[in-house]
Amino acid sequence: MDNIANNIKLRLSLREPLQDSLDILVQLSQQLNLSKPPSKHEEAEAFLAEELAKVKALFPTCTNFERDFTSIAFSIATGVGKTRLMGAFISYLYLSKGIKNFFILAPNLTIYDKLIEDFGNPAYQKYVFNGISEFVHNRPVIITGDNYAQQGGLFKDGEIRINIFNIAKFNSDNRGTNQGGVSLAPKIKRLSEYLGESYWQYLSSLDDLVILMDEAHRYHADASKNAINELKPILGLELTATPFDEKGKAFKNIVYEYSLAQALADGKFVKAPAIAKRKNFLKGSLTEKEVELIKLEDAVSIHLDTKTELELYAKNNEVKLVKPFILVVCKDISHAKEVFDYINSEDFYDGLFVGKVLQIDSSTRKQEEVEQQFIALENPESNIEVVIHVNMLKEGWDVTNLYTIVPLRAANAAVLVEQTIGRGLRLPYNGKRTGVDKIDKLTIVAHDNFDAVIEAAKDPNSILNKISFIEIDEEDLNVKTEVITSKPKTEITFEKEQKQIDVIPDNVSKQKAQNSLDAKKAIIYALPNFNSLPEVRNVKDLNKPEVKKKVIEQIEANLNKGQANLFAVQILEEAEVAYEKIVTDYQNNIIEIPRMDLVQGDVIAGFNNFDLDITDFSFQALEQEIIRIGLTDQKIETIKAKSSGSYGNPINNIIASLIDYPEVDYDDNADLLYHLATQAFNAVTDNIVDKEHLSETIFQFKSAIASKIYEQMKGHFVVEVQDYVAPNVLAFTVIEPWNFSALVNAGYRDYRDVITPVSFIPKYVFRGFEKACHFEYKFDSKTEQDLAFVLENDDSVLKWLRPAPRQFRIYWDNNSKQYHPDFIVETADCIYMIEPKASDKIKDADVLAKKVAAEKYCKYATEYTSQNDGKPWKYILVPHNEVGRTISLSYLIAKFDN
């Protein structure tokens, strides 16, 4: 545990993805040299290869720095807080490693201006170093693309220096100019009178320069790469929400990824985007202008509804008022001016928006009044409710009160939505969702392109559906893995609560909180032990006074075992108070699965009675001779053997040879064996020429006779499988944890993600579930992943579970195998055991045998629950080609519940 990093997390209030990113930097900073590569090319290549190997060993997705220095990338969704993360990076590298020189690249003027405020103005509400006490009296010096030539204290000891440059200016300054016919070096490379050397040379000579690249996808072009390489930093830290270069190729130096899909799944840090259109809208013969009018009108309807909801929320919760606005995306400047004039007139909503519309594009961007209105959009005093733009609102536009987007005249609406949606994802209330649907939602109005946008959202590359994890090559998948445990929700809740307790500074408050948590744990861990009480017929019965008394007594006994807990009295008091609530929470987070051992009765194997076919039972006695061979002369002679006449009972001899076969059990088949042996004896008797040698003949041929009988017996062999034995059923059982392997740092995906190729699906651990009893699962096939998607998004589903191997005890195939159901799904009136299976295997013997076992479990479960105020259980076997993300659970039930 790194105390400096932990303090930064607390001081800067870093969200979980940012904390994870900082942890990665901490980990790598302890492994990397953090020095410049050697000047010689061969030595530099060897140095970088060694550094890359260190990174790749920990983060297999990083396969190439793609620069002439060590550079790692963090792909983090828009709105999660990349700028704050840069502040955390700088704070850590200074406080832990003593690094004092930083260079931040901005992709455009908007971000450039914002970064100067973010890093250089302590009075600014989004100042990134708020809480870093070391920077109060030693404020970082901000050197910009506009003032670098005038900076005078560049060599002052102990000073943190943060250079902020706009890449556009950076590149243009780097191209050089011509003055009086004389070619001059680029401005940044020219001699500084104060320094006596060019600022460029100064920067590139620093032995602790770290470069941070905001919107890093803008710096992967060859020209940008070359310019950045010349700075010769010791480390590059790249941040982007879209880790693809200008040619669409994925970054090769990703060490961490938290995509929009993950953020949406977590439901914490960004708004939930939704595509909307007017119900039953048909373009038909409507003109473009008529379609635009409908879209604008509907956007206003949504906007006004959202505005009201925000006002109510602010009043009811005594928080700041957030005033939403609409973003209208136009085709070009003339189109934007036309739309502006219309919305800003009395003809639109009777003049409701006159004076409340802002046009922001290259034709208005430099107007001082427009600029001020643009900057003040988040201010509750701002009267702007509609912003019209063409292409100005790109990266860096981080307002939190954009709630409605209207793309007009889009040749490719889906692309436009993807490019624009990031502008509206940020949340207004401390960057977190409120739980109020309309306040946590961003709406895109796309009437005429609604179907196209929805279809595009299904595409693996769509920002709405695609988790942008780097697709690892097959050979790279066989990298380091780790064993992880997917714990039930209740345990995860306890772990999160424990982390909160660990950082409580006041010891008294901390111990009180710890006692409360220990009481909750004691109750939860004790409850499953009481599922066998006669008075406990379902989870609700745990609230019975007599049951509560027994549970509390058990908790007290547990607390006093061995070295007694010093706070046993307080914990027991907490348990008494919290018991009913904990039981209710427990019930809400599990599916009540009746506990039973479902086994088949003993298998009975044997032979049916039959008469022997005796057409081929003709044997004659062999001459008994002794053969003698001389050892020296090899002479052979024979001597006739004389028998004592004692060959035993011929029928018994036949039976003795028959029971040498493993399937033939004498005790179970004695009558049949005597019957067949007697028939064989009679047949040999009837066919033998010299009856005096009957016993001798049978003795000689007993094995052959037994073989003939056995061949016929095999045709009458039967295995009688006994039905399942009625089990002892208990009310419920604990939700078991999952244990499985995951690729280190690269093996997690969101369940909404479309994986290509589908063969990679079993390799990943999927997250993002809200209704499931665990937060993480693995899937064996696309069908299973798609079914999970359906269950998560179907309103009829209350809870669902992908059972761990130990969850059920259902046996089949003569108790030699255990059946593990794929899905357990609880609805308002039933609990379903669902098994998706390849359509061509539905009739396979093993599938049908498991079906019998599953149906038997459901039968016994239903018999129990029907008598104890529970829900019936049903088994559904579903062909894989019937499962898709657009089907409903009711469809599957209607078609396959038979």
Image (tube, rainbow, N blue to C red):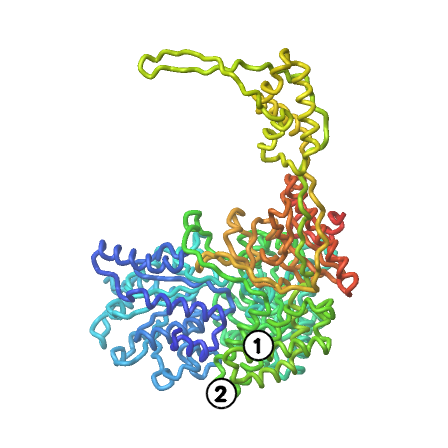
> Residue furthest toward the right?
867
Looking at the rendered structure, the number of numbered marks drawn on it comes to 2
Residue 231: where, in percent of width, then height? 29, 65
Q: Is residue 667 above or below residue 123?
A: above
Q: Give me the residue at 29% from left, 74% from top.
A: 149
- Label 2 crowd (10 A; few <14 / some 14-19 / many >=20): few
Q: Give me the residue at 70% from left, 40% from top.
A: 720
Q: Amino acid at mark 1?
A: Asn
Q: Is residue 416 above or below residue 628?
A: below
Q: Is residue 211 above or below residue 559?
A: above
Residue 79: where, in percent of width, then height? 52, 69
- Label 1 crowd (10 A; few <14 / some 14-19 / many >=20): some
Q: Quadrant of the N terminus?
A: bottom left
Asked whether residue 852 appears in the rendered view, the answer is yes
Q: Is residue 687 left or right of residue 742?
A: right
Query: Which is more toward the observer, 528 or 86?
Result: 528
Q: Secondary structure at mark 1?
A: helix
User: N-terminal of the two: label 2 or label 1?
Assistant: 2
Query: Which is more toward the observer, 220 or 807?
Result: 807
> Residue furthest toward the front?
644
Residue 190 quadrant: bottom left
Residue tagged 2: 506
Q: Nearer the viewer, mark 2 or mark 1?
A: 1
Disc number at residue 413? none
Asked whether residue 338 appears in the rendered view, the answer is no
Residue 51: where, in percent of width, then height? 30, 60
Residue 233 quadrant: bottom left
Label 2 and label 1: CA atoms lie apart by 28 Å
Q: Amino acid at mark 2?
A: Asp
Q: Secondary structure at mark 2?
A: loop
Residue 102: where, in percent of width, then height? 33, 72
Residue tagged 1: 558
